[in-house]
Image (cartoon, rainbow, N blue to C red):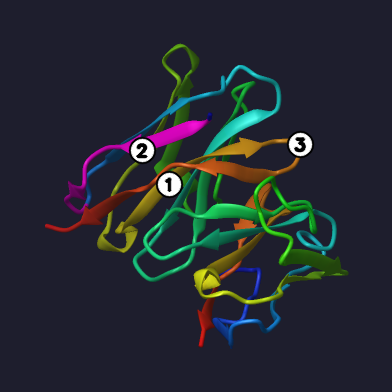
Amino acid sequence: QIALKESGPTLVKPTQTLTLTCTFSGFSLSTTAVGVGWIRQPPGKALEWLALIYWDDDKRYSPSLKSRLTITKDTSKNQVVLIMTNMDPVDTATYYCATHLEWFRLFESWGQGTLVTVSS
Amino acid sequence: QSVLTQPPSASGTPGQRVTISCSGSSSNIGINNVNWYQQLPGTAPKLLIHSDNQRPSGVPDRFSGSKSGTSASLAISGLQSEDEADYYCAAWDDSLKGPLFGGGTKLTVL
């Protein structure tokens, strides 16, 4: 049974750095062709892909946010961390992590999401 | 702004068949598989259709997907009240070197 859960602050101030952790179980990030991605969804708006990290440490970032994002993994802890710098109120959103199957290029299992509000 | 274009809304009555379209380009839908996600109110998205027309285990066969050229469609037959949700198409984009989501379609069951 695959499970993912996002954790991190619910409120950050503008210009601050956001650090989110995805803790997962039921699979290993050392398994070939497995990855974990981050997707966000502003209130009432569409899903937006942010970043991906794969079993072999290959990393992909959304071009529009690449300069602000860093994704890392800790295979021994079953965790993936997303860092987003210079937060702005427009970054207010629910942030999801999800498993990404490299060969099928799809997000299979999703976490419940965590709402991050950016406000002073 | 999403590069995959979906109608913002769709509706139908119970028992009807509805379709939701997703229009892309040669760098995404034209050369890569399309996946569909269902997001029930207040919940995380769930994989509904993958690889253009494949249903994951547990997804009713009322849901089907198709693709032609740079466009894809999700069809829901025998519409039920519990199908009321947001539906998103997605595809890998070779120019982006990452996944793209559509803008989402809100399905209302009248």
Mark 3 vs mark 2: same chain? yes
Quadrant position of residue A107: top right
Instruction: Report x, y in % for residue B68.
Output: 87, 70
Task: Name the residue: 61% across, 42% down.
Answer: A108
Q: Residue B59, relative to residue A77: is it above or below? A: below
Q: How far, Cα to Cα, is label 3 from label 1?
A: 21 Å
Residue carrying label 3: A103
Circle 3 — which element?
loop
Q: Chain of mark 2?
A: A
Instruction: Report x, y in % for residue B33.
Output: 79, 54
Instruction: Report x, y in % for residue A5.
Output: 38, 36
Q: Chain of mark 3?
A: A
Categorize mark 1 by other alpha carbons within 10 Å: few (<14), some (14-19), many (20+): many
Task: Name the residue: 83% across, 67% down.
Answer: B67
* Residue range highlighted in magenta: A2-14
Contact (CB < 8 A) between labels 2 and 1? yes
